[in-house]
Image: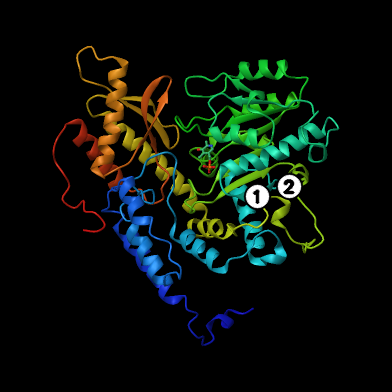
């Protein structure tokens, strides 16, 4: 099919008005991000009143549906696409990735099989190789483009379950887990909750997770791992390590822990939802040294790579363990032996052709652009934390090693208690969000309330960091100064 085929004179397909309405809304939104309050401005009751319209018998014109939708959600779209959003671990969307994501919906390919979406299959093939090379994973590793790290864990741990039981002659795909030797999952005790959910989905059971002791930065203590590996040596073992703790950004010491685990016959899985991207930068690569010797890895596209949501990646060092746990053959499916059918690697059947957005993001940035993105976010994190720490009543609990940090705000009351500091911390976070200038989220860390700082948006600029610091200064100095240029989208 030549591109010329697309440029023949065409009758209007009837989509134009609706898509133009969407484009106009999108541009209005994107061009206002800089001025818009970054937190939601609308309460739940209002939102429900606006959206719970009567569902009509005869439907509504498509362009009216889109126009209503854009109007009704106004003020309740949290500014996570903005460079002033520092909550959780959330990236924005690169222009090329966003546009490719629109086209993905337009083309509406079912990316289960090559024969059902040839371009979608080849784009994943290409982007998968790029990702392995950029992050520094073995070139022979297999991969899957999934919805996020949650499903990437599921995919990788299905391969792990297959392999560790297979070594004992137990075919888990055929026999299931009833009567199987119990698997022990030796995990960083401060893991992300998506790990235990994957363990649950796979029928291994949360009570078979052994929490490994961690140091004050949430890194596995090597002797704790060694003890557990010896204690559970008679059962199949999966070790779960972290590249990037969501609070501290800290990395497990892969160079020590991975060879140790493998020596004991354990499968090593690494949660690198954002942290694996450290591998793309010469400045931060040391943090992931030795990670390539693991058996499986997960990371996200929708966080640091700034692909729209619905983008995570699973990588497995042993492609056989991976495909044997996922693949399926059926007479009515048209398998192409020469091609890569995604159904052999992915847990889904029908699925979105999500590789296009990743492919576009990688091409927009290029190698240097990816390294710059990672290094710039880390630099902004450091600047933000340093400047906020110079304000009165600020305690830095965890300095950034990458793009995450923890800060606590202390009460100036005489003989203030830990509870007073906890309350102060929550108050400051809420007050900063209320300024509309910046958005941060909180956690409880070693029993104390703390504010998390996370920078992973491609568009975060020095000016955004400035505005965030000024918001803290305003709040901490109780000044009533407001920024005149801060208008709502409606204004
Ligand atoms: C975000 C995150 C996850 C979960 O990833 P999803 O993409 O939300 O499924 C898992 N682990 C870590 C460390 C994370 O930051």
Task: Look at the picture and state if 292 lies above or below 134.
Answer: above
Q: Nearer the viewer, mark 2 or mark 1?
A: 2
The residue pinned by badge 1 equals 144
Tell whether 80 sits left or right of 215.
left
Question: Which class describes the residues within 10 Å of circle 1: few (<14), some (14-19), or many (20+)?
Answer: many
Q: In which quarter of the image is the N terminus?
A: bottom right
Mark closer to the chain start, 2 or 1: 1
Residue at image point 42% right, 24% down = 445
| Residue holding disc 2 | 326
The residue lying furthest to the bottom in this view is 9
Q: Nearer the viewer, residue 52 or 135?
A: 52
The percent coordinates of residue 203 (x first, y second) are: 69, 33
Residue 411 pos. (x, y %): 24, 21
Q: What element carries label 2?
A: helix
Disc 1, SS: strand
Q: Which residue is drawn at 65% across and 57% down?
A: 350
Residue 244, percent from left and from top = 51, 34
Counting from the top left corner in percent of width and height, residue 389 is at 28, 29
Q: Nearer the viewer, residue 384 or 136?
A: 384
Query: Neighbour class for label 2 at 10 Å: few (<14), some, many (≥20)?
Result: many
**Residue that appears at 34% across and 28% down:** 407
Give the residue furthest to the left.
480
| Disc 2 + disc 1, Cβ < 8 Å | yes
- 319 to the left or right of 37: right
Quadrant of the snapshot with the C terminus: bottom left
Vertical comparison of 327 with 53: above or below: above
Q: Quadrant of residue 390?
A: top left
């Amino acid at each position: 099919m030549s591109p010329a085929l697309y440029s023949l004179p065409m009758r209007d397909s009837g989509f134009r008005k609706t898509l133009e309405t969407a484009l106009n809304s999108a541009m209005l939104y994107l061009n206002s991000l800089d001025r818009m309050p970054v937190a939601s401005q609308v309460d739940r009751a209002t939102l429900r009143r606006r959206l719970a319209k009567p569902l009509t018998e005869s439907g509504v014109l498509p362009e009216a549906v889109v126009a209503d939708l854009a109007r009704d959600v106004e003020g309740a779209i949290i500014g996570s696409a903005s460079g002033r959003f520092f909550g959780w671990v959330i990236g924005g969307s690169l222009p090329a990735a966003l546009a490719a994501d629109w086209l993905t919906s337009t083309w509406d390919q079912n990316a289960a099989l090559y024969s059902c979406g040839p371009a979608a299959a080849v784009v994943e093939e290409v982007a998968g190789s790029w990702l392995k090379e950029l992050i520094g994973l073995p070139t022979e590793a297999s991969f899957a483009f999934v919805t996020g790290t949650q499903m990437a864990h599921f995919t990788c741990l299905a391969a792990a379950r297959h392999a560790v039981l297979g070594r004992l002659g137990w075919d888990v795909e055929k026999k299931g887990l009833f009567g199987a030797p119990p698997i022990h999952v030796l995990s960083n005790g401060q893991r992300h909750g998506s790990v235990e959910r994957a363990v649950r989905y796979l029928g291994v059971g949360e009570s078979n997770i052994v929490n490994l002791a961690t140091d004050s930065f949430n890194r596995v203590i090597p002797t704790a791992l060694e003890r557990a590996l010896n204690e559970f040596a008679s059962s199949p073992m999966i070790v779960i390590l972290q590249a990037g703790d969501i609070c501290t950004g800290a990395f497990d010491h892969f160079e020590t822990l991975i060879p140790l685990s493998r020596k004991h016959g354990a499968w090593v899985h690494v949660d690198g939802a954002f942290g694996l991207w450290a591998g793309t930068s010469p400045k931060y690569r040391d943090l992931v040294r030795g990670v390539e010797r693991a058996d499986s890895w997960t990371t996200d596209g929708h966080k640091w790579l700034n692909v729209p949501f619905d983008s995570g990646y699973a990588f497995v060092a042993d492609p056989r363990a991976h495909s044997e746990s996922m693949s399926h053959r059926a007479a009515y499916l048209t398998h192409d032996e020469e091609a890569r059918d995604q159904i052999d690697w992915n847990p889904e059947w029908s699925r979105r052709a999500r590789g296009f957005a990743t492919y576009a993001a990688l091409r927009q940035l290029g190698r240097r652009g990816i390294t710059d993105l990672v290094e710039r976010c880390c630099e902004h994190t450091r600047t933000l934390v340093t400047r906020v720490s110079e304000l009165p009543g600020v305690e830095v609990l965890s300095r950034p090693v990458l793009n995450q940090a923890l800060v606590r705000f202390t009460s100036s009351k005489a003989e203030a208690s830990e509870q007073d500091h906890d309350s102060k911390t929550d108050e400051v976070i809420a007050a900063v969000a209320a300024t509309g200038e910046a958005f941060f989220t909180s956690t409880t860390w070693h029993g104390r309330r703390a504010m998390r700082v996370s920078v992973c948006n491609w568009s975060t600029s020095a000016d955004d960091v400035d505005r965030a610091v000024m918001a803290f200064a305003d709040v901490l100095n109780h000044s009533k100064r407001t920024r005149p240029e801060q208008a709502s989208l409606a204004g």
